[in-house]
Image (spheres, grey):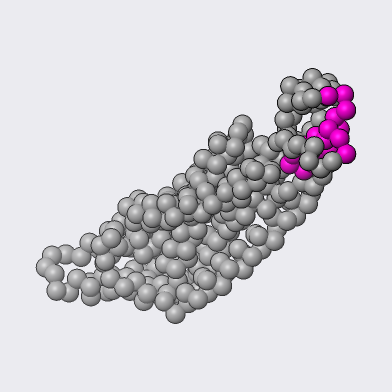
Amino acid sequence: MREKGNIDPTLRALGGRARYQMLHLFAINIGAFGASYQLLNNIFTGREVLGQRCAAPDNSSLRANNDFQNGDSNSSHVTYGLCEITVSKGNLSSDEQQYPCPDGYEYGYSRDLSFRTEFDLVCDRKLLGGLTQSFVIMGQGFGAVLSAIVSDRFGRKRTLIASQLGLLSVGIAIGLAPSYAVLAAFKFLVGGFQQGVVTGMAIMSIELLPTEYRSLSALVGSVLWGCSSCSMAVYAYLLRDFPWRYLQYTLSGVSALICLLQLWYLDESLRWLVANGRKDGTEAVLKRAARVNGKDLAVIVSTLQDSVNESQHTHRGSCWYQRTV
């Protein structure tokens, strides 16, 4: 990214942390609701449902299964455990044999309350349930690198909105997942887009304010992240008796509302516009910010031009930004 000068004096002339900056700071960090929902919803969509045990055969006759046709099947006694069935031929423990659940599992509640039970991620497959969160974390690493490159090239706002749209699309796709393999693949993607949102929020918040007020962006971001994490429990409670897919759709839908708000209201980062020589975009942002904060636009433009000229003092040629207002 090409450096075009320090624009902190311009941001201070705009009021530093005046109305325009605070409204934008809120609109940027409200994206925490969509990002935290997709990062943490495994707690509810992948919850463990109590009452699990091996399911009985549909025909209620174990003698129909060849696995238990060993010796005198008429004397067999079958005990259904959590992860296996125990077949005893007599009174001695040496006569007992254990088998993996041949007919799947049954649960104390509806099996679609959690993706763990719907995909039978229990017993020897229990680790696969927690592994979905590992896929999210791996996706975050990929998304953090890619989103930083893309935001430098195409702009902060575009990257943030694109990540929100990706988070919405993949979140809905997770709710439609027909198998564990598909679920795991989309969990990786949701981690990438989630980190794109988080990175975009952090960059835009920092670039919105002068250096001395950047701790404010961290404060607002932390408060909204905490609120979003707590609010997810409310949705989970209200939908506790519904299939996990309903909660997944609901949490994903929040990203749609956030995306519409940010697309309509947010301006591109002024620092990025100035650094990349985007004259028209810079003028539009300055006009709006000056109007909202009640500042003199001519003074703001003059301050920005002085900062840019100072950075180019050792270079020949005219400044990229000429005062046109």
Residue at x 69% of width, y 43% of height: 122
Q: Which quadrant: the C terminus? A: bottom left
Q: Is residue 255 visible?
A: no
Is 286 located above or below residue 251 in the figure? below
Labels in figure, total? 0
Residue at x 44% of width, y 80% of height: 212
Q: Position of residue 291 (x, y in %)?
A: 48, 64
80 part of magenta stretch: yes
* In the image, farthest residue toward the bottom: 212
* In the image, farthest residue toward the left: 316
Could you tell whether 142 is left or right of 22 in the image?
A: left
Q: Nearer the viewer, residue 177 or 130?
A: 130
Is 319 located above or below residue 85 in the figure? below
* Numbered range of the magenta stretch: 72-91
Q: Quadrant of residue 71?
A: top right
Q: Nearer the viewer, residue 259 or 44?
A: 44
Is 8 located above or below residue 228 in the figure? below
199 part of magenta stretch: no
Residue at x 86% of width, y 35% of height: 90
Could you tell whether 241 is left or right of 291 in the image?
A: right
Q: Position of residue 43 (x, y in %)?
A: 68, 53
Q: Which quadrant: the N terminus? A: bottom left
Q: Nearer the viewer, residue 229 or 80?
A: 80
Q: Position of residue 281 (x, y in %)?
A: 36, 55
Could you tell whether 55 is left or right of 209 in the image?
A: right
Q: Position of residue 94 (x, y in %)?
A: 78, 41
Q: Is residue 149 visible?
A: yes
Could you tell whether 32 is left or right of 68 in the image?
A: left
